Image (cartoon, grey):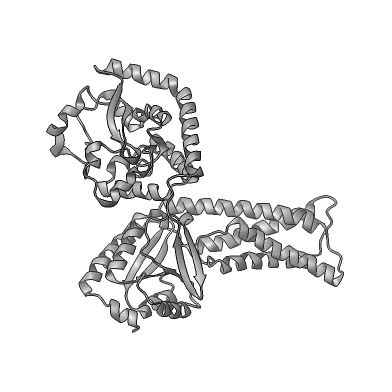
Amino acid sequence: MSRIEARLAPPDSVFRAIAASTAVMRSETRRTTMRPRAIALWVVVTDALVVLAALATTAVVPGAGLSSLGLNALVFVGWQVALIGTRLRAGSASRSDAGGPARVIAATGIVFGTLAVSAIALDVPMDRALFTITLPLGTVLLLGSHSLWRSAVRTLQHAGRLEHAAVVVASPEDADGIVNGLRRDRAASTTVVDVVTDFDDAVALARRAAVDTVIVGPTAHGGDVRRLAWRLEGTRATLVLATRTSDVDPHRLRLETREGLALLSVRPARFNGASHVAKRVFDVSASALTLIALAPLMACIAAVIRIDSAGPALFRQTRVGKNGETFTMLKFRSMVNDAERGVEQLRELNDASGFLFKMHDDPRVTRVGAFIRRHSLDELPQLINILRGDMSIVGPRPPLPREVSSYEGDVHRRLLIRPGLTGLWQISGRSDLSWDDSVRLDLNYVENWSLFGDVRVIAKTVSAVVRPVGAY
């Protein structure tokens, strides 16, 4: 037993609780799943078929000439070996990563570069069709097939049908955080099958192919980790080092090595600059165009609301925006007029946690209101708030003043940027979210937002509106 193992030896009761959590994870993933190793095998098979198709197409193109069988076989084998080799170098040979464009281009360059140099050095005539047809056609087909595989992998991950089997080697505190984090993130598609403190147990599981991932906690000694990596040689398991850095997107992380020491640098979040200007330009242009396009629909909704129940079509409420400044948020009225006066009478029936008030069957919601809430049509007037500069298309949930007055500690960071018409909370369960989960998602967005990320949130919002979950 190493120094770190002796220091981390925990009470059995602690690990029994964590083991119960891992048992839940296993039971949740007992439906039909695919192992990453199976995906990797299918990627190799499709690579082979694509290369064969490129070579066969070259052979049947009129005037292209016919390369010798031996040369075609050499190109086929070399291309396959190069593709597998680049994946091995990237550490993804047995995992679900189909390989990015750079790896395909690198493998292709190695094969045809070697072929060209060899032909020149040996003064051997080379069929030009290999370079004018096979090379570009094969590259395009490989890039296309790998792109399809990456899309398929993402779909399987989000559906919870792609499973990495992992063992965690960590202290009780760190193991609990790792297991719970993996449970929350379905896209991680990792099932923890065991939690141990002894590196021997982790190696034994890897050698039996019971796991394909060994996750080591952040308190492990560098020398112990290095020796563990040596012992995992010859297995198909990937060694993963967990850190206590959480809710930081990859674009803010950079791994550096100095004098053999691995350092993980975290770029601080920025709340001004060119990216924020671009975000504001996008907000103004997108909200203006959307308002013009949806003006007839919004007029119809306003008219139906007035016909359905007494009161104005718009509901106005004070919310807190960027840097704690208050503004009047607009929504289509979905409840009876003066509904806020009846909140205290219904407080005991609150289905939400924290400062939020939500009811599945709120008696104050009108017939039209129930429909426009379910499909988030009541939020459309907030496009006007976006034009005014009160809100953004994507951002944290706009809080009420009474919520903000009770904020403690880090929660105030939600106010560093404009609140959003939609956001991570909107596409992650909406009213079904707990207060803590809502705060966690909002802080995650504040720290890690990007324009590309905003586009993804908008795309997922469309799906959430069409297939509403947690909207009431």
| Left or right of 257, for residue 22 | left
Residue 243 in the image: x percent, y percent? 38, 65
Q: Residue at x 49, y 61 (%)?
A: 254
| Left or right of 150, for residue 241 | left
**How many numbered circles are shown?**
0
| Left or right of 439, for residue 281 | right
Q: Is 193 rendered above or below residue 58?
A: below
Residue 53 in the image: x percent, y percent? 70, 55
Q: Nearer the viewer, residue 456 or 366?
A: 456
Q: Nearer the viewer, residue 376 or 40?
A: 376
Q: Residue at x 35, y 49 (%)?
A: 443
Identify the image quadrant of the C terminus.
top left
Residue 203 in the image: x percent, y percent? 41, 78
Q: In terms of image quadrants, where is residue 138?
A: bottom right
Q: Residue at x 21, y 36 (%)?
A: 359
Residue 413 in the image: x percent, y percent? 33, 47
User: What residue occupies the far bottom of the structure in this picture?
Assistant: 1
